[in-house]
Amino acid sequence: MKVLIDDKIPYIRSAAQWLLGDVDYLPGHAFGGSRQLAETDALIIRTRTHCDEALLASAHRLRFIATATIGHDHIDADYLRRRGIAWTNCPGCNAASVAQYVRNSIVKTSFRLLENREQRTENSLENKEEQSVHAPLTVGIVGYGHVGRAVRRAVEAMGCRVLLNDPPLEEAIRTQLRRGSISYHTSEESPSMEGVLPLEGEIEGASWTSTTFVTLQEIAEQSDVITFHTPLTTGGSHPTLHLADSAFFASLRRRPVIINAARGGVVDEQALLRAHHDGLVGPMVIDTWEGEPNINPHLLREAFIATPHIAGYSADGKSCATRMALRAVCRHFGIPIDDEARFLALTAPPSLPPEVQPSGRWADDALTLYDPLLDTARLKASPATFEQQRGTYPLRRETFE
């Protein structure tokens, strides 16, 4: 069996050589037309390799593709199904990393948010009954998959109030409830099913308890921070392309921080810039961009935090994705992983330098592990190296361990 692997996937070489034997490496953009591709049984890729007929027409031996990413919009699933090629992504692999990015971005923007609250409380008749400026921030999370759930845990640990929006998931849960596939219970806090889904059970491997969904309009009206974590879709009953558009921004009430760490097209960048210039939007935090790697220079200049699609790029998240991709290949081809401890050791991220130690102050420690303004400075200084900055991203850990 022969496996071709993207050469930017970290912590994979020793384990791949041990488990898979005949392995080649190429840059993700160089798979097309390569001699290795025609002789390959399995691919392990990232988002930069678009697996469609144009790429894979000559890959006659190919039987399996693992993308070491959460996203899979670079996979032509219909074409692979016609060819009988199985594939998988790595859902949840970097959810904690994105949650770290969102939490730390909120920490960096919190002073501006409090200033906004003070201005609203003093100057706006509509907000006279609003809680004091010292009340917890309200964070609207749009998209409640693996990443959205990790973000919720992270911001609730900061004392934030959370609002959740995910119409496709809400519909799926209601359908399962009607079928009796999952159970629910009521409580004094949630005595009615109207708008509230207090759940016990699993949908697509995820456990659900006491989950309340709100509309996107409620997110727009009540949130101090709005963070997007949806896939990019153009069809179906709930497309997400330009989900945040001019109408959405016009409905904002609190001049919130806007965070896009989902996909570039989820936020209409031109509409976002107009809303920012009109004072409807506060600090902008942009990790995913339309037209990557040729990103919008005006948005780059105006964004408070601007990073090269690396929200999920912690060493821990990359290690998790590598392990999930290797396990998937082994599972598909019936290759045993006989020594779990060795497997974990070979795919482990490096330790932090010994001088990096916790102080005991949670916000300081969070920013010691990751300060998004450092990535912002690098990207603003050299936007043309967007891809290089992704490919050579420095060590970033989620914990001090």
Image (cartoon, helix red, strand yellow):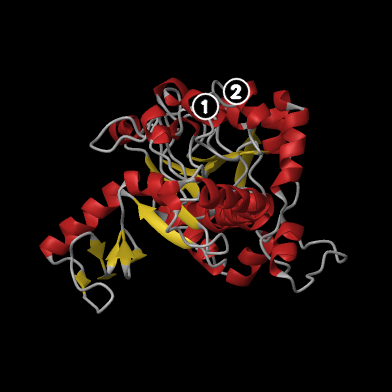
Q: Going from the N terminus, do you reach mark 2 or mark 1 first?
A: 1
* Residue 11 visible, this angle: no
Q: What residue type is disc 2 on?
A: Asn
Q: Are marks 2 and 1 in contact (CB under 8 Å)?
A: yes
Q: What residue type is disc 1 on?
A: Glu
Relative image position of residue 316 (x, y in whole percent): 64, 58
Relative to 229, say whether 294 is above or below.
Answer: above
Q: Give the CA distance from mark 2 to mark 1.
A: 8 Å
Q: Which residue sits at x=18%, y=69%?
A: 192
Q: Give the residue pinned by disc 2.
A: 296
Residue situated furthest right in the rendering: 355
Relative image position of residue 161 (x, y in whole percent): 46, 62
The residue closer to the viewer here, 265 or 253, is: 253
Image quadrant containing the C terminus:
bottom right
Q: Which mark is residue 290?
A: 1
Residue situated furthest bottom in the rendering: 188
Q: Which residue sits at x=59%, y=32%?
A: 28
Relative image position of residue 35 (x, y in whole percent): 58, 25
Q: Is 304 left, or right, of 272 in this rendering?
A: right
Q: Which residue sits at x=51%, y=44%?
A: 256
Relative to 219, say whether 197 is above or below.
Answer: below
At mark 2, the secondary structure is loop
Q: Residues within 10 Å of mark 2 (few under 14, many from 20)?
A: some
Q: Is 80 left, or right, of 311 in this rendering?
A: left
Relative to 299, say whether 18 is above or below.
Answer: below
Relative to 235, say whether 399 is above or below.
Answer: below
Q: Which residue sits at x=72%, y=33%?
A: 379
Q: Residues within 10 Å of mark 1 (few under 14, many from 20)?
A: some
* Residue 265 visible, this angle: yes
Q: Is 326 left, or right, of 25 in this rendering?
A: left
